[in-house]
Amino acid sequence: MNKVYLLVKLGHVRQICHCRYFHYKNLLPSIDENTLKNVKPYGDIPGPKAIPFLGNTWRFIPFIGDFQIQHIDKVSLKLSQKYGKIVKVDGLLGRPDMVFLFDPDEIQNIFRREDHLPLRPSMPSLDYYKHTLRKDFFSDTGGVIAVHGEQWQQFRSKVNQIMLQPRSAKIYTEVISDIADEFVQRVSKIRNRNCEVPDDFLNEIHRWSLESLAQIALDIRMGCLEDSPSEDTQNLIDAINIFFINVPILELKIPFWRIFNTPTFRRYIQALDCIKEICLKYINKSMENLNMDKPESQMSVIQKVLKENPIKVASILALDLFLVGVDTTSNAVASILYQLSINPEKQELLHEEILEKLPTTDAKLTTEKLEAMIYLKACIKETMRMYPVVIGNGRQTSSDVIISGYHVPKGVQVIFQHYVISNQEEYFTRARDFIPERWLKNHMAFKEHHPFASLPFGFGKRMCLGKRFAELEIQTLIAKIMRTYKVEYHYKKLDYHIHPMYTPNGPLKLRFIKRNDEPLK
Ligand code: HEM
C-alpha cells in the first residue's frame, strides 16, 4: 500500500517538475536547459509574510508595523539577517512587489544584461505630477527623473554627453572653488566663541549646494551664501526637502493619494510647484544674460544644451537637476565632515595631503591639483561606502528573469541594498571601520573589493547624471574646509537615519578651529 502511494507521489512530483520546466521554457526562452531544470518558483523566495487585504503594506503603518521609513536601513539589515541574500516583500498596495538583493554578484548580472531602456523603480507620484497634473508644462519632454522608456531615452541622449564628459565639469573648477571659499568664510562668521556652528548647520550646507547647482544648471549666482539671501533660497531648500521626505511616504504607505487629495499629497504638489516656479524664474533670468558666442570648449552645460535643443529641454533639465542635485550633495558633505571629525587621525593625513598641494591659503585650486588629491577622494569614497546618501538603488524587471536561481516575473522592483552590502565583512575587511586607505591602489593591507559592492552613483545607462559635478563640488569644498580648519565633534555619537537622504541624525555641532597658516615643512 505504502509503495503504491510512494510511486503515485513520485509520479506527481515528476509531473509538477515537468510542467514547471515547460512553463519556464516559455517564459524564459533564452535560458539554457540546465538552468531551467533547476529554477525555483517566485513564491519560494523567502521574506516576511503578507496578510490578506493589506499584504505587507501594514508593516509601514506607524505604531503597528515594524518597517519605519526613517530606519529602513535597519529594516533591510534585519531582513538580510533573517532571510539571506534575496528577500521578497510582496502584496504591497498600489505598487509592484519588491525583491531586496544583498548579493553584488547578482547585482552585477542585472546591470550587465541591462537593455537600452533600464527602468529605475521610482516615484509614481512624480510621474503623475509630470505626466498628468502638469502635463501642459512637461508635455512629451518629461526629463529623466520618474520618466521611463523611449521618452527617458530621448531626453537622456540629448544631455548625457554634456553632463558626463569630464571636461564639462572642469570648466566649473574656478567658480565652484569661489563658492567653496565663500562657504569657508561663512563658517567663520556663524561660529560661536567655542568655534561651534549652529544646530542648523545642515541648512547652511544646503545653501552652498544650491548656490553651486544654480551655477551648473543655470549659469547664475543666486546669492544663497549672502547674509540675507533672497526668500527664494530658503523656499527652494524647504520645497526640495518636502519633496524628498514625502516620496517614500507616498510610495510605501497605503496610497490614498491615488484616490483623493490627502494632506501629504497636497504638500508634495505644492512643493513641486514651488520648485518649478522658482526654477522657471531663474531660468528666464539666466536666458537674458546668456552669451552664446563662446567657443564650445568654454561653454557651460546650459549653453551646450541650448545649442542643439529648444529652451524647453534646458528648463526641464534644470528642474530635474534641482530636484535631485541639492540634497544629495549637501548630505554627502555633512556625512564626510562628520566622519572626518570623529576620525581625527585620518583627518590629519588628509590635511597633510591638502597642505602639500595648497601650501598657502591663497594657492589656487586647479583640476590637476584636485586630481592628485588621492587621499581626499579615498575619504569621500569611504564615507559613501559606509553611509551612502542613497542607501539603495534598483531596477524594475522588463521581462521574466532568473535571479539567485529564482524565477522573478516581469514588473517586479529589484532593490539593490548597497548600504547593507557595503558594510558587510564578506565584502570589505574591517567593514565597520573608517579606513580610506582601502581605496588607495596597491595598498597591501586590503584585498580587492567586489566592484558592485559599493555603487553610490549607480551604474550603467541610468547612472547618476550629475556624478562629475557632485564629485567636483564635494572634493573642492572638503579640500577648502580642511585647508582652513580642523573639524572636531565633542558630543554623543550620531546615529544615521533617512531624512530624506542617509545622513547623521542630530544637530551637526561641529567645531571649526582655524589652523595656523603653516607653510610646508
Ligand atoms: C553625492 C551626490 C550624489 C549621489 C550619491 C547621487 C546618486 C545617484 C544615484 C544612486 C542615482 C541613480 C542611478 C542609477 O539608477 O543607476 C542618481 C541619479 C541621478 N542623479 Fe545623482 N547623485 C548625486 C548628485 C547629483 C547631482 C549633483 C546631480 C545634478 C547635477 C544629480 C543628478 C542625477 C540625475 C538627473 C539622475 C537621474 C538619471 C536618470 O534617471 O537618467 N545627482 N544619482
Image (cartoon, helix red, strand yellow):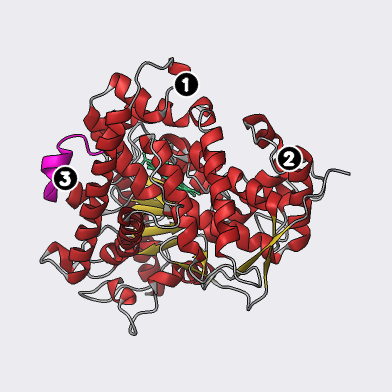
Q: Is residue 135 left or right of residue 8?
A: left
Which of the two discs, 2 and 3, labels the residue nearer the N terminus? Answer: 3
In percent of the image, x 24 and y 48: which residue is there?
Answer: 276
Q: Quadrant of ligand 1?
A: top left
How crowded pointer 1 is (Cα within 10 Å; few <14, some 14-19, many 20+) is rated as some
> Which quadrant holds the C terminus?
top right
Labels 2, 3: front one: 2
Name the residue: 41% across, 50% down.
Answer: 394
Helix, strand or loop status at disc 1: helix
The residue segment tinted magenta is: 132-143
| Residue 392 x, y percent position in the rendering | 46, 55
Upstream in sequence: badge 1 or badge 2: 1
Amino acid residing under circle 2? Leu
Q: Give the farthest residue toward the right.
A: 521
Mark 2 crowdedness (10 Å alpha carbons): few <14, some 14-19, many ≥20: many
Give 113 or 408, whichever is nearer the viewer: 113
Q: Secondary structure at mark 3?
A: helix
Residue name at image x 27 percent, y 76 percent: 51
Q: Is residue 141 magenta?
A: yes
Residue 497 in the magenta stretch? The answer is: no
- The residue wearing badge 2 is 358
Categorize mark 3 by other alpha carbons within 10 Å: few (<14), some (14-19), many (20+): some
Say which mark, if any, is on residue 131.
3
Residue designated by label 1: 298
Whole-angstrom CA distance, mark 1 to mark 2, is: 26 Å
- In the picture, measured across the screen, residue 160 lies left or right of residue 193, that is left
For the residue marked with disc 3, what is the amino acid? His
